[in-house]
């Protein structure tokens, strides 16, 4: 929080092997009051920069030399669990995004994102929320859930700890519904839904809604094609 009570803008690290992308993102973010703490040209540099600069959010390209964005994300979240990672990809059906969400990334953006959307996404993820484009996220999960190497992900698969209502809430999160939409669907108050969501996260050790979507599909709670 700032002294006037508003949310503090997150400090950002930009990790991308293309200089023009890094420069463009830096200009966009700084023009909108978001501090860019540093830049990295590959995953190894990103891991080192997070240790040194302690940013709130990392804009992480998936495909980079030396160390790719997936391995960098895994290492960063293991060492700095409070840091948020927002993945950057060229294609909205990039198979690696599914793995990134499983590892704990807070969401993903296409590199042709508008300046306004980029800044809004960084602020959103910086608050601890997840950036999900439900239609794209569902397509990603549906396409690659069956192929995912479950031993490589950090998402637990046992839902036995959840109550029937909590499993219902997880299922609706997996379909991409917001808390408001879940409240309407289940005829509950939004505050009650938030409580259920928090308990689901706590019991399953989930970071955010991105991982909730992944686990809902991995466990079969939501089937491909479910709407």
Image (spheres, rainbow, N blue to C red):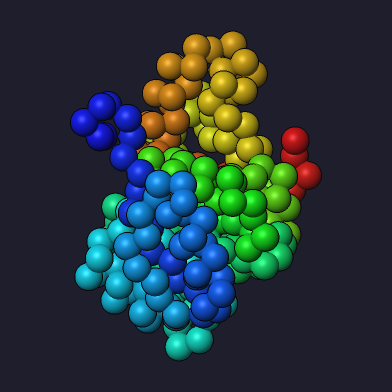
Q: Nearer the viewer, residue 205 or 75?
A: 75
| Residue 157 coordinates in the image, percent (x, y) | 48, 51
> Looking at the image, is 210 positioned above or below residue 16?
above
| Residue 30 coordinates in the image, percent (x, y) | 43, 54
Q: How many marks?
A: 0
What residue is rendered at 67% in x and 60% in y?
112
**Quadrant hosting residue 80:** bottom left
Q: Is residue 79 visible?
A: no
**Quadrant hosting residue 50:** bottom left
Q: Quadrant of the C terminus?
A: top right
Q: Quadrant of the N terminus?
A: top left
Q: Is 225 on the left-hand or right-hand side of 99?
A: right
> Looking at the image, is 65 positioned above or below residue 179?
below
Q: Is residue 136 visible?
A: yes
Q: Is 159 on the left-hand or right-hand side of 36?
A: right
What residue is rendered at 57% in x and 56% in y?
108
| Residue 19 coordinates in the image, percent (x, y) | 52, 78
| Residue 121 coordinates in the image, percent (x, y) | 52, 46
Q: Nearer the viewer, residue 204 or 80?
A: 80
What residue is rendered at 44% in x and 17% in y?
192
What residue is rendered at 66% in x and 42% in y?
134
- Outermost residue on the right side: it is 225
Q: Nearer the viewer, residue 203 or 100?
A: 100
- Outermost residue on the bottom side: it is 66
């Amino acid at each position: 929080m700032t002294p006037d009570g508003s949310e503090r803008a997150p400090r950002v690290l930009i990790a991308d092997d293309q200089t023009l992308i890094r420069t463009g993102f830096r200009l966009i973010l700084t023009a909108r009051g978001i501090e860019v703490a540093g830049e990295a040209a590959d995953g190894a540099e990103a891991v080192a920069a997070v240790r040194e600069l302690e940013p709130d959010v990392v804009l992480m390209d998936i495909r980079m030399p030396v160390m790719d964005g997936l391995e960098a994300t895994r290492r960063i979240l293991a060492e700095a669990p409070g840091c948020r990672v927002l993945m950057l990809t060229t294609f909205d059906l990039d198979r690696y995004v599914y793995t990134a969400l499983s590892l704990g990334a807070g969401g993903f953006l296409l590199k042709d994102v508008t300046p306004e959307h980029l800044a809004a996404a960084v602020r959103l993820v910086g608050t601890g929320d997840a950036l999900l484009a439900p239609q794209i996220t569902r397509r990603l999960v549906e396409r690659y859930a069956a192929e995912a190497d479950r031993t490589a992900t950090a998402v637990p698969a046992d839902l036995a700890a959840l109550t029937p209502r909590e499993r219902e809430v997880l299922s609706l999160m997996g379909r991409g519904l917001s808390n408001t939409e879940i409240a309407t669907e289940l005829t509950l108050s939004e505050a009650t839904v938030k409580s259920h969501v928090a308990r689901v996260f706590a019991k399953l050790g989930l970071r955010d809604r991105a991982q909730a979507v992944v686990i809902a599909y991995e466990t079969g709670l939501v089937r491909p094609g479910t709407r």
